[in-house]
Amino acid sequence: DIQMTQSPSSMSASLGDRVTITCQASQDIGNNLIWFQQKPGKSPRPMIYYATNLANGVPSRFSGSRSGSDYSLTISSLESEDMADYHCLQYKQYPRTFGGGTKLELK
Amino acid sequence: QIQLVQSGPEVKKPGESVKISCKASGYTFTQAGMQWLKQAQGKSLKWMGWINTNTGKTTYAADFTGRFVFSLETSASTAYLQITNLKNEDMATYFCARAAFAYWGQGTLVTVSS
Protein backbone atom coordinates (compact mmCIF):
# COMPACT_ATOMS: atom_id res chain seq x y z
CA ASP A 1 0.00 0.00 0.00
CA ILE A 2 1.10 3.58 -0.60
CA GLN A 3 1.82 5.39 2.65
CA MET A 4 1.06 9.08 2.91
CA THR A 5 3.06 10.80 5.64
CA GLN A 6 1.42 14.08 6.57
CA SER A 7 3.02 16.83 8.63
CA PRO A 8 2.57 18.51 10.94
CA SER A 9 -0.11 16.58 12.80
CA SER A 10 -1.21 19.82 14.40
CA MET A 11 -0.28 23.45 14.26
CA SER A 12 -1.41 26.78 15.52
CA ALA A 13 -1.17 29.94 13.48
CA SER A 14 -2.34 33.54 13.57
CA LEU A 15 -4.78 35.24 11.26
CA GLY A 16 -2.95 36.44 8.17
CA ASP A 17 -0.17 33.85 8.49
CA ARG A 18 1.03 31.79 5.57
CA VAL A 19 0.49 28.12 6.39
CA THR A 20 1.86 25.06 4.64
CA ILE A 21 0.89 21.43 5.22
CA THR A 22 2.80 18.61 3.55
CA CYS A 23 2.20 15.02 2.52
CA GLN A 24 4.96 12.71 1.39
CA ALA A 25 4.09 9.68 -0.72
CA SER A 26 5.98 6.40 -0.25
CA GLN A 27 5.64 5.56 -3.95
CA ASP A 28 5.06 7.47 -7.13
CA ILE A 29 1.52 8.80 -7.26
CA GLY A 30 2.02 11.34 -10.01
CA ASN A 31 -0.37 14.20 -9.34
CA ASN A 32 -3.14 11.88 -8.13
CA LEU A 33 -3.69 13.65 -4.83
CA ILE A 34 -6.60 15.47 -3.26
CA TRP A 35 -6.53 17.84 -0.29
CA PHE A 36 -9.63 17.93 1.91
CA GLN A 37 -10.78 20.33 4.58
CA GLN A 38 -12.93 18.92 7.36
CA LYS A 39 -14.69 20.91 10.07
CA PRO A 40 -16.05 19.29 13.25
CA GLY A 41 -19.11 17.17 12.64
CA LYS A 42 -18.95 17.72 8.89
CA SER A 43 -17.99 15.71 5.84
CA PRO A 44 -14.64 16.34 4.18
CA ARG A 45 -14.68 19.04 1.50
CA PRO A 46 -12.32 18.69 -1.45
CA MET A 47 -10.12 21.76 -1.75
CA ILE A 48 -7.43 20.78 -4.27
CA TYR A 49 -7.65 18.14 -7.01
CA TYR A 50 -4.85 16.58 -8.98
CA ALA A 51 -2.33 18.07 -6.57
CA THR A 52 -2.58 21.63 -7.85
CA ASN A 53 -6.09 22.35 -9.12
CA LEU A 54 -8.42 24.42 -6.98
CA ALA A 55 -11.85 22.85 -6.52
CA ASN A 56 -14.94 24.87 -7.41
CA GLY A 57 -15.76 27.58 -4.92
CA VAL A 58 -12.50 27.31 -2.97
CA PRO A 59 -10.93 30.67 -2.14
CA SER A 60 -7.81 31.58 -4.09
CA ARG A 61 -5.75 31.85 -0.90
CA PHE A 62 -5.55 28.04 -1.05
CA SER A 63 -3.04 26.44 -3.38
CA GLY A 64 -1.45 23.06 -3.96
CA SER A 65 2.02 22.21 -5.18
CA ARG A 66 4.27 19.24 -5.74
CA SER A 67 8.00 18.71 -5.48
CA GLY A 68 8.89 15.14 -6.29
CA SER A 69 7.07 12.93 -3.78
CA ASP A 70 6.23 15.88 -1.53
CA TYR A 71 2.86 17.54 -1.87
CA SER A 72 1.93 20.77 -0.15
CA LEU A 73 -1.23 22.66 0.65
CA THR A 74 -0.63 26.33 1.29
CA ILE A 75 -2.96 28.94 2.70
CA SER A 76 -1.46 32.29 1.77
CA SER A 77 -3.21 34.40 4.40
CA LEU A 78 -5.03 32.50 7.13
CA GLU A 79 -8.61 33.42 7.90
CA SER A 80 -10.70 32.31 10.86
CA GLU A 81 -12.89 30.10 8.67
CA ASP A 82 -9.82 28.07 7.69
CA MET A 83 -9.52 26.52 11.16
CA ALA A 84 -10.20 22.85 10.46
CA ASP A 85 -8.61 19.47 9.92
CA TYR A 86 -6.87 18.90 6.61
CA HIS A 87 -6.33 15.53 4.95
CA CYS A 88 -4.46 14.40 1.87
CA LEU A 89 -5.56 11.39 -0.18
CA GLN A 90 -3.76 9.51 -2.93
CA TYR A 91 -5.90 7.97 -5.64
CA LYS A 92 -3.15 6.59 -7.85
CA GLN A 93 -3.57 3.06 -6.53
CA TYR A 94 -5.92 0.85 -4.58
CA PRO A 95 -6.30 0.95 -1.70
CA ARG A 96 -6.79 4.69 -1.61
CA THR A 97 -4.82 6.00 1.36
CA PHE A 98 -4.99 9.14 3.46
CA GLY A 99 -2.39 11.05 5.38
CA GLY A 100 -2.76 11.18 9.14
CA GLY A 101 -4.39 14.60 9.07
CA THR A 102 -3.40 18.06 10.28
CA LYS A 103 -5.36 19.97 12.89
CA LEU A 104 -5.05 23.69 12.22
CA GLU A 105 -5.87 25.91 15.17
CA LEU A 106 -5.80 29.60 15.90
CA LYS A 107 -2.87 30.84 17.95
CA GLN B 1 -27.96 19.31 -7.29
CA ILE B 2 -26.11 16.16 -6.39
CA GLN B 3 -26.78 14.90 -2.88
CA LEU B 4 -25.91 11.83 -0.87
CA VAL B 5 -28.10 11.37 2.18
CA GLN B 6 -27.17 8.74 4.72
CA SER B 7 -29.28 7.01 7.33
CA GLY B 8 -29.28 8.13 10.92
CA PRO B 9 -27.05 7.24 13.89
CA GLU B 10 -27.07 3.68 15.18
CA VAL B 11 -26.41 2.22 18.62
CA LYS B 12 -25.58 -1.46 18.63
CA LYS B 13 -24.17 -4.09 20.93
CA PRO B 14 -21.04 -6.09 20.15
CA GLY B 15 -21.91 -9.02 17.91
CA GLU B 16 -24.90 -7.32 16.33
CA SER B 17 -25.15 -6.12 12.73
CA VAL B 18 -25.82 -2.73 11.24
CA LYS B 19 -26.83 -1.62 7.76
CA ILE B 20 -26.22 1.98 6.69
CA SER B 21 -27.86 3.47 3.63
CA CYS B 22 -26.68 6.18 1.27
CA LYS B 23 -29.36 7.58 -1.04
CA ALA B 24 -28.16 9.46 -4.08
CA SER B 25 -30.03 12.12 -6.01
CA GLY B 26 -29.31 14.69 -8.69
CA TYR B 27 -27.52 12.35 -11.07
CA THR B 28 -27.83 8.95 -12.72
CA PHE B 29 -26.91 6.54 -9.93
CA THR B 30 -25.26 3.96 -12.15
CA GLN B 31 -22.88 6.44 -13.75
CA ALA B 32 -20.57 6.83 -10.78
CA GLY B 33 -19.22 4.33 -8.28
CA MET B 34 -19.78 4.69 -4.56
CA GLN B 35 -17.04 4.58 -2.00
CA TRP B 36 -17.21 3.95 1.73
CA LEU B 37 -14.94 5.47 4.33
CA LYS B 38 -14.49 5.13 8.08
CA GLN B 39 -13.48 7.79 10.55
CA ALA B 40 -13.04 6.88 14.18
CA GLN B 41 -13.38 9.71 16.69
CA GLY B 42 -10.35 11.98 16.52
CA LYS B 43 -8.72 9.91 13.80
CA SER B 44 -8.03 10.33 10.14
CA LEU B 45 -10.06 8.78 7.36
CA LYS B 46 -9.75 5.20 6.14
CA TRP B 47 -10.91 4.10 2.72
CA MET B 48 -12.94 0.93 3.04
CA GLY B 49 -13.52 0.20 -0.62
CA TRP B 50 -16.03 0.85 -3.35
CA ILE B 51 -18.88 -0.64 -5.32
CA ASN B 52 -19.41 -0.28 -9.03
CA THR B 53 -23.00 0.93 -9.20
CA ASN B 54 -23.34 -0.32 -12.77
CA THR B 55 -22.14 -3.92 -12.28
CA GLY B 56 -22.31 -4.38 -8.51
CA LYS B 57 -18.66 -5.43 -8.40
CA THR B 58 -17.10 -4.68 -5.04
CA THR B 59 -13.54 -3.90 -4.00
CA TYR B 60 -12.61 -3.99 -0.33
CA ALA B 61 -9.52 -2.67 1.40
CA ALA B 62 -7.63 -5.37 3.29
CA ASP B 63 -8.85 -4.20 6.71
CA PHE B 64 -12.47 -4.43 5.61
CA THR B 65 -12.91 -7.94 4.29
CA GLY B 66 -15.19 -10.56 5.78
CA ARG B 67 -17.56 -8.60 8.02
CA PHE B 68 -18.18 -5.67 5.67
CA VAL B 69 -20.52 -5.85 2.70
CA PHE B 70 -21.36 -3.20 0.12
CA SER B 71 -24.62 -3.60 -1.75
CA LEU B 72 -27.02 -1.68 -3.96
CA GLU B 73 -30.69 -1.07 -4.49
CA THR B 74 -30.35 0.52 -7.90
CA SER B 75 -34.07 1.17 -8.34
CA ALA B 76 -33.89 3.38 -5.24
CA SER B 77 -30.52 4.96 -6.11
CA THR B 78 -29.24 3.68 -2.79
CA ALA B 79 -26.00 2.07 -1.69
CA TYR B 80 -25.63 0.13 1.54
CA LEU B 81 -22.86 -0.75 3.93
CA GLN B 82 -23.53 -3.69 6.23
CA ILE B 83 -21.24 -4.59 9.09
CA THR B 84 -21.80 -7.90 10.84
CA ASN B 85 -20.52 -9.17 14.18
CA LEU B 86 -19.83 -5.63 15.36
CA LYS B 87 -16.74 -5.05 17.47
CA ASN B 88 -15.80 -2.11 19.68
CA GLU B 89 -13.30 -0.97 17.09
CA ASP B 90 -16.09 -0.55 14.53
CA MET B 91 -17.37 2.44 16.47
CA ALA B 92 -16.91 5.32 14.06
CA THR B 93 -18.56 7.64 11.59
CA TYR B 94 -19.04 6.04 8.20
CA PHE B 95 -19.22 8.11 5.04
CA CYS B 96 -20.29 7.31 1.51
CA ALA B 97 -18.66 9.34 -1.22
CA ARG B 98 -19.23 9.40 -4.92
CA ALA B 99 -16.38 8.40 -7.19
CA ALA B 100 -13.71 11.13 -7.35
CA PHE B 101 -14.67 12.20 -3.83
CA ALA B 102 -16.46 15.35 -4.97
CA TYR B 103 -19.68 14.50 -3.13
CA TRP B 104 -20.03 13.01 0.32
CA GLY B 105 -22.84 11.87 2.53
CA GLN B 106 -23.23 13.57 5.88
CA GLY B 107 -21.87 10.58 7.74
CA THR B 108 -23.50 7.97 9.97
CA LEU B 109 -22.27 7.50 13.51
CA VAL B 110 -22.23 3.89 14.66
CA THR B 111 -21.86 3.44 18.40
CA VAL B 112 -20.95 -0.02 19.66
CA SER B 113 -21.54 -0.47 23.35
CA SER B 114 -22.58 -3.30 25.61
Image (cartoon, helix red, strand yellow):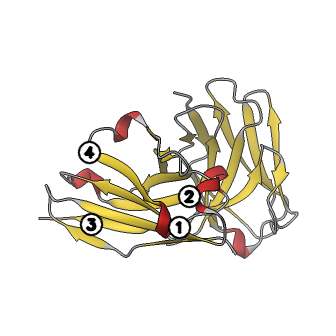
User: Label 1 belongs to which residue?
Assistant: B105
Q: Check disc 1 and give the amino acid type.
A: Gly
Tag 4's secondary structure?
Answer: loop
Tag 2's secondary structure?
Answer: strand
1 and 4 marks on the same chain: yes
Q: Check disc 4 and give the amino acid type.
A: Arg
From where the camera sits, is residue B72 visible?
A: yes
Crowd around label 3: few <14 · some 14–19 · many ≥20 (10 Å) = many
Which mark sits nearer the N-terminus, 3 or 2? 2
Which mark sits nearer the N-terminus, 3 or 1? 1
Q: Position of residue B74 (x, y in %)?
A: 49, 61
Q: Chain of mark 4?
A: B
User: Label 3 belongs to which residue?
Assistant: B111
B27 vs B84, left or right, is: right
A69 vs B52, left or right, is: right
User: Label 2 belongs to which residue?
Assistant: B97
**Comparing labels 3 and 1, the label whose residue is closer to the camera:** 1
Q: Position of residue B108 (x, y in %)?
A: 40, 68
Q: Are marks 2 and 1 in contact (CB under 8 Å)?
A: yes
Q: How far apart are the alpha carbons under marks 3 and 2?
A: 21 Å
B15 vs A8, left or right, is: left
Q: Nearer the viewer, residue A80 or B101?
A: B101
Residue in the image at 72% along x and 38% along y: A32
Q: Position of residue A37 (x, y in %)?
A: 65, 61
Q: Are marks 1 and 4 in contact (CB under 8 Å)?
A: no
2 and 4 marks on the same chain: yes
Which mark sits nearer the N-terminus, 4 or 3? 4
Q: How far apart are the alpha carbons under marks 2 and 1?
A: 6 Å
Instruction: Give me the disc on residue B48.
Output: none
Instruction: Give me the disc on residue B67.
Output: 4
